[in-house]
Image (cartoon, rainbow, N blue to C red):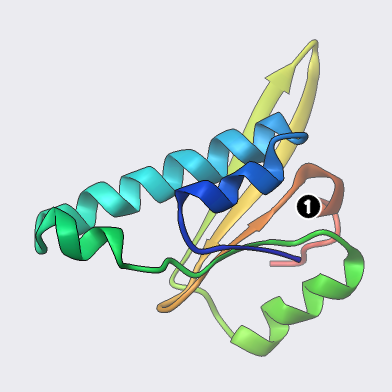
Amino acid sequence: MISIINIPDTAALINEPLIYREVTSYLLYCRQELLEYEDEEDIDDHDFNFSVLQDTDDLRMLDELGPPEETVQINLKIDGMVQTIYRIVYVTTVIFVPADLSDQITF
């Protein structure tokens, strides 16, 4: 599992452009949403709790966290093939499930 707590941490995903784009975009969206309630200086110190699952063993984390607040299925059509990425949002964490693990999720 890869943990992402701020924008620089997303560099760990640079070799996976699809998941990199989705994680970075959502992190920036969450940061912008926080700006509505806090000053920019406070936001820079805020740590996000994002995780990107990497293998089948990481999927157990989903069972441990219980029911999510939101589950988003992102279908990306590339060269005639569809790749699915999940963004699973809990109260205190956001989990991203890359395409190679998405077929093992049972919601």
Helix, strand or loop for disc 1: helix
Q: Which residue is the site of mark 1?
A: 102
Identify which residue, 42 or 54, lies in the foreground: 42
Assess disc 1: are there few (<14), some (14-19) or many (≥20) residues with their C-alpha within 10 Å of its C-alpha.
some
Identify which residue, 104 or 8, lies in the foreground: 8
Compared across the picture, whether 9 is left or right of 32 comes to right
Q: Look at 40% across and 68% down and name the residue there.
A: 47
Q: Look at 36% across and 44% down and name the residue there.
A: 28
Percent from the top left, x then y, of residue 81? 82, 21
Percent from the top left, x then y, of residue 23? 54, 46
Total numbered labels: 1
Query: Which of the 4 image quadrants contains residue 77?
Result: top right
Compared across the picture, whether 85 is left or right of 8 comes to right
Image quarter where the C terminus lies is: bottom right
Percent from the top left, x then y, of residue 98? 74, 48
Q: Look at 90% across and 67% down and name the residue there.
A: 56
